[in-house]
Image: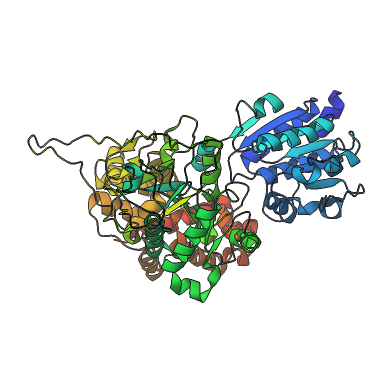
Amino acid sequence: ISTQRAEKIISQDYYFDGTDRKPRYYQQIAVNRTVEAVAKGQNRILLVMATGTGKTYTAFQIVYRLRKAGVKKRILFLADRNALIDQARRNDFKHFKDKMTVVKHRQIDKSYEIYLALYQGLSGSEEDKNIYRQFSPEFFDLIIIDECHRGSAKEDSAWHEILTYFDKATHIGLTATPKESKDTSNIEYFGEAIYVYSLRQGIDDGFLAPYRVIRIGLNVDLEGWRPEKGKTDIYGNPVEDRIYNRKDYDRNLVIQERTEIVSKKLTEFLKGYDRFAKTIVFCVDIDHAQRMRSEIANLNADLVSANYKYVMQITGDNDEGKRELENFTEPDEPYPVIATTSELMTTGIDAQTCKVIVLDCNIASMTKFKQIIGRGTRIREDYDKRYFTVLDFRNATDLFADKDFDGDPVRIKPVSEETDLSKIIDEEEHEPLPADKETGEEIPFEPITPDYPEPFIDKPQVREKVFVNGVDVSVLVTRELHFDRQGKPVTMSLKDHTKEVIFGNFATLDDFLNKWNSADRKTAIIQELEEQGVSTDALLDAVNKEMDLFDLICYLAFDQPPLTRKERVNHVRKSNCFVKYGEQSRKVLEALLDKYADVGVENIENLEVLKVKPLADFGSAVEIIGMFGGKQQYFEAIQELETELYKAA
């Protein structure tokens, strides 16, 4: 490829739609590396980007720049789920307008330039279903394979069949979790990834939501369950005498009381947190998802009677549920609130406002685990979504300790039978380790790791599920865990851990006040504490959401009486400190005070705040800064505002 042609390819600009949206730094790196690879003649490219980091938007920018350069004119975007195609069509790829089509009903129209298609819709076991052959092998210049890690052996075969047919095109694979197994290898096909942006990087950069974990260990899961002599199922048939464990539950043995207690604990949590927090419940299979929906509906009859869509089963066989999938992912749609599912929602679903993920299924695959956790990683501060919670009923979060997992949770909190999950946001009292009665020394905690026998299933025979009731199911006593900056568990409450970090940085209240007051940007101090394992969002939830982080630190570590943000704003307004500014400048500062009262100091230190209402009503960011005489004077005014805010005793 000539240098002149390569320069033409690389020099193309990004697409801008007239809004403030532009590629983030890591998206720019991914796009630039891909475009450069194409310019050098590389035809197999792999991009690995964590769920929620905008893979489809990145793909759109790649397509836009390569088309603009004139090197890739006909493009095929391949996926294996309708939701992925629909999201691409409705969102990022919509800018291609009439040049784009979605392949449906096995009908091919060759007059378009960009095609979105399910690979199962292009191929099939019968030759007449292989409609991709209606295109010539040279028809496409570029093929993008979304979620390229996924597929069964049969699906992999169809996937490769299409790519082999169009082997002269450039193939770009997108995934959050590249798959390496004896049957499937993304790296073998595409080569090493030209760029990797991990979950940990996304959380550290503030683009992905951090999360906390609440573990709920049930007695029948941790100890196993053996039916008493003569035990029969709900139909009166004898139950096989053996020890059952969590690998059996809801797969070949259903304990009615277990379903009830999982639903009860979820409902309890939501009542204390937010009953309208978008929640996904991951179940073992479709039958399990159906039973969970029914039980959750029974426990939330008041909200279900107001709108039956409060909790819905969204699985592959449920047409009504599938129709509601788009509403579940739409931030402005209040219903459905709770979705019970098995496989359908594990990947490719852009649930931006999902605040709670419930794990009641056995997860052995790190690929699947990362995809499930990825359902909650979007940040939407405009919908009060800054972090999310995982309720784990199957110890699936043991996978956090796996070396292949790259994003540690903010904290993990196992709970006991007596723990009231409705108060879990407020409950952060330190629980010491149990002490030896004779020596008084603390007994080190050893996690329960039961040695489960593999459930015996005669391979040729399909085992029917056994349904039983009358079983004593309870939550076993365990303890609270948090994670330090290295991701290692610490044995103290969130409050105590925060105190320890603060005292490690500031010996006295005066030390803290001097550092805080002398800092040009308070955000830098907050980020420094977060890097040391202090979860500021979870801490504010636990103590008082209306409080400033400054007051929270002074209160927790130095026993100072706190003020709410609104109280601090009132003190500033009474001081008349803005009298020296012009009328418009004073109005801007008043609006910034309102912003501080709503969301805190980090927001007013960011120039992006000038681009949203009510600040945007005063003009563009440049115009607003001009009211103060320039950028330096604007930031001096912000520092003066902060000084006045933190003068208040």
Which percent across, then down, holds residue 457? 48, 37
Residue lying at 80% horizontally and 35% vertically, measured from the top left: 162
User: Quadrant of the image for the N terminus?
Assistant: top right
Disc count in the image?
Answer: 0
Q: Quadrant of residue 169?
A: top right
Q: Which residue lies furthest to the bottom in this view?
A: 306
Quarter containing the C terminus: bottom left
| Residue 175 visible in the shown view | yes
Identify the residue shown where x is 81% and y is 53%. Answer: 104
Residue 490 x/y as whole percent = 30, 38
Give residue 451's quadrant in the image.
Answer: top left
Q: Which percent across, then down, holds residue 427?
A: 29, 56
| 37 horizontally vs 386: left or right | right
Asked which quadrant contains residue 583, the reply is: bottom right
Judge by depth and name the residue closer to the eye, 423 or 66.
Answer: 423
**Residue 213 sits above or below residue 10 on the image:** below
* Relative vertical location of residue 66 with respect to residue 513 in this rendering, above or below: above
Q: Is residue 13 visible?
A: no
Q: Position of residue 593 (x, y in %)?
A: 46, 64
Report the residue that reaches farthest toward the left: 438
Taking depth in this image into account, of 533 and 304 the one nearest to the observer is 304
Relative to 349, 189 lies left or right: right
On screen, residue 489 versus residue 158, left or right, reads left
In-front residue for pair 554/74? 74
